[in-house]
Amino acid sequence: MRYALLLLLGIAIGALAMSQIGRILAARDAYPRGVMAVMQQHYGALRQALGGKACNAGANAENLAWVARMSTQINPALNPQAADLRFDTYVRKLDARVAAAQAVAPADCPALRVAARSIGAACQACHEVYR
């Protein structure tokens, strides 16, 4: 009886410890996931506007601005030690493409479509290596 009670107590303590470790590991990835989620949301809004042929200059400029803000947070969130130079190259390419997209008139659907594809290609290239 005593051994069964100790076994149950050990299982309960182990389960509690594992849940705490799981929370710590999940919190560690919260910032990088948040950066990617916000960027994906605004890039998706751009793609949706282009798909619906609704080139609202204000909305497109705002979404591009958010993508630009989040692209500056990729390196600190995902590569804090800056040990991987390939990763830095992907981030710089994305930054350049976002800046080029902001330079075109956001209300010009054809130009914005090309810019959005370019941004998407930069994202995809990095995700193929690091996802």
Image (cartoon, rainbow, N blue to C red):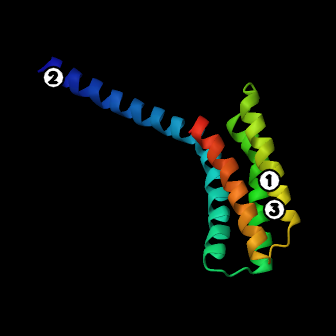
Residue extending furthest toward the top? 3
- Identify the amino acid type marked 3: Ala
Q: Residue at x 58, y 40 (%)?
A: 128
Q: Quadrant of residue 68?
A: bottom right
Does residue 120 show up? yes
Q: Residue at x 78, y 69 (%)?
A: 111
Q: Image quadrant for the C terminus?
A: top right
- Identify the amino acid type marked 1: Arg
Identify residue for label 2. Answer: 4
**In the rendered image, the vertical position of residue 34 relative to residue 2, given as above or below:** below
Left or right, 119 with respect to 58, comes to: left
Marks 3 and 1: CB-CB under 8 Å?
yes
**In the rendered image, the vertical position of residue 114 relative to residue 27, given as above or below:** below
Q: What whole-number distance in Å separates the C-alpha atoms at marks 1 and 2?
A: 63 Å
Assess disc 3: are there few (<14), some (14-19) or many (≥20) residues with their C-alpha within 10 Å of its C-alpha.
Answer: many
- Identify the amino acid type marked 2: Ala
**SS for dot 2:** helix
Viewer-proximal residue, 32 or 26?
Answer: 32
Identify residue for label 3. Answer: 101
Q: Residue at x 73, y 40 (%)?
A: 90
Q: Mark 1 vs mark 2: which is more N-terminal?
A: 2
Left or right, 128 with respect to 118, comes to: left
Which circle marks residue 97 in the picture? 1
Residue extending furthest toward the right? 103
Viewer-proximal residue, 25 or 127?
Answer: 127
Assess disc 2: are there few (<14), some (14-19) or many (≥20) residues with their C-alpha within 10 Å of its C-alpha.
Answer: few
Residue 53: x and y in percent read: 66, 80
Residue 32: x and y in percent read: 64, 44
